[in-house]
Amino acid sequence: MVLLSRISHTPFLPVKSSLPLSIQSSFASHCQLGHGIVRKNLNDNNNNKLHHHHREQLQLVAVRNKAKLGTRVKCRASEKFKNISSEEPQNDNTTVLQLLLWAAEGVYIVWLFLLPYAPGDPVWAISQDTINSLLGLSLNFFFVLPLINSIGVHLLESPVIHPMEEGLFNFVIGWTLMFAPLLFTDRKRNRFKGSLDVLWGFQMFLTNTFLIPYMAIRLNKADTESSPKEPSKLEAVMVDSAPVVGLIGGVVCTLCLAWACFGRMDGNFGSLTDRWEYFLGYLGSDRLGYAFIWDICLYTIFQPWLIGDNIGNVNESSVNTVSKLRFVPVVGLVAYLLSLDPAEEL
């Protein structure tokens, strides 16, 4: 190959050759042809190397782009759980808020259970009349017994209690019922190390006595070392049946308002004005009714707070609606439970 290359670039000197002219011409043509073939092969080899190198570069770029895309997908997939697994900074505002919540818990217990200054009897001096009233309200839970009696079934007679008392009692209990799926889908629930089943169970009886501490504990720093808890049977049922729970709670709370105004019309409880006057007197003389007003005020604060922190659990088409309705007592919680997205449940 070197020889042919040199021959092709070396001019033929006008020397006299012993070969015939036709042979000389043929030899020169073959030399030039050989040089062309060699040069073509070299160019082809170089082109093949360039193409191979170009393909390697394209493959490398594709791998890098795929890696970047995978990283973005992974980040988006973990975005849903960032409120659970990521460690959020404990700033001064969070600390102050926690202190306020623990202070509210202390005031709630001391003022409503222990001190004699609030209307009605404290726990340590509770009267028999208060106990009987509480038992009667419990028997009329969600108006089941009064409604059964109203259709002629009298296996157990419903205690006759003022409709305003029954309406207020069942309104708070119905609202508390709907807090179960909300707590079980809270993205910060794992910061509470106890049993949410037990906490909500006590909340059904003592309302904010247990909800206030939960609201304070969920503001703790995220524990990145602990693994998420396995859902309990109660949690699974409440979350799977969240729309049903929302409908039941919403119907009960609506029925409470109607019952307070129009229930037991044959019981000589008076007109709407008479019932309203009784209601005001009831709040000023009964510790249970007075405490329920506290519960309504606190639920009105905690409901939009919890829903706002967990708005990502709602269907995308309902986010705007739930975001606005969450500030409406009871209605916002019903909207949240009806709009839960099973794909976003934790």
Image (spheres, rainbow, N blue to C red):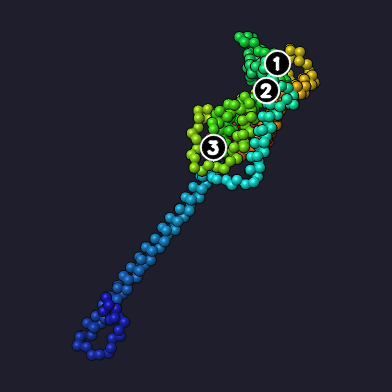
Q: Which mark is residue 190?
A: 3
Q: Residue at x 73, y 18 (%)?
A: 262
Residue 214 lies in quadrant: top right
Left/right placement of residue 322 relative to residue 13 reads right
Quadrant the N terminus occupies? bottom left
Q: Tell me the element at label 3.
A: helix
Q: Position of residue 301 (x, y in %)?
A: 68, 35
Q: Is residue 45 visible?
A: yes
Q: Are marks 2 and 1 in contact (CB under 8 Å)?
A: no
Which of pointers 2 and 1 lies earlier in the amino acid sequence? 2
Q: Position of residue 5 (x, y in %)?
A: 29, 78
Left/right placement of residue 208 relative to residue 262 reads left
Q: Which mark is residue 123?
A: 2
Of tags 2 and 1, the one toward the viewer is 2
Q: Residue at x 61, y 30 (%)?
A: 210
Q: Nearer the viewer, residue 163 or 243?
A: 163
Left/right placement of residue 170 relative to residue 51 reads right
Q: Tell me the element at label 1.
A: helix
Above or below, 304 relative to 93: above
Above or below, 235 relative to 28: above
Instruction: Tell me how far mark 2 sits from mark 1, CA to CA.
Output: 13 Å
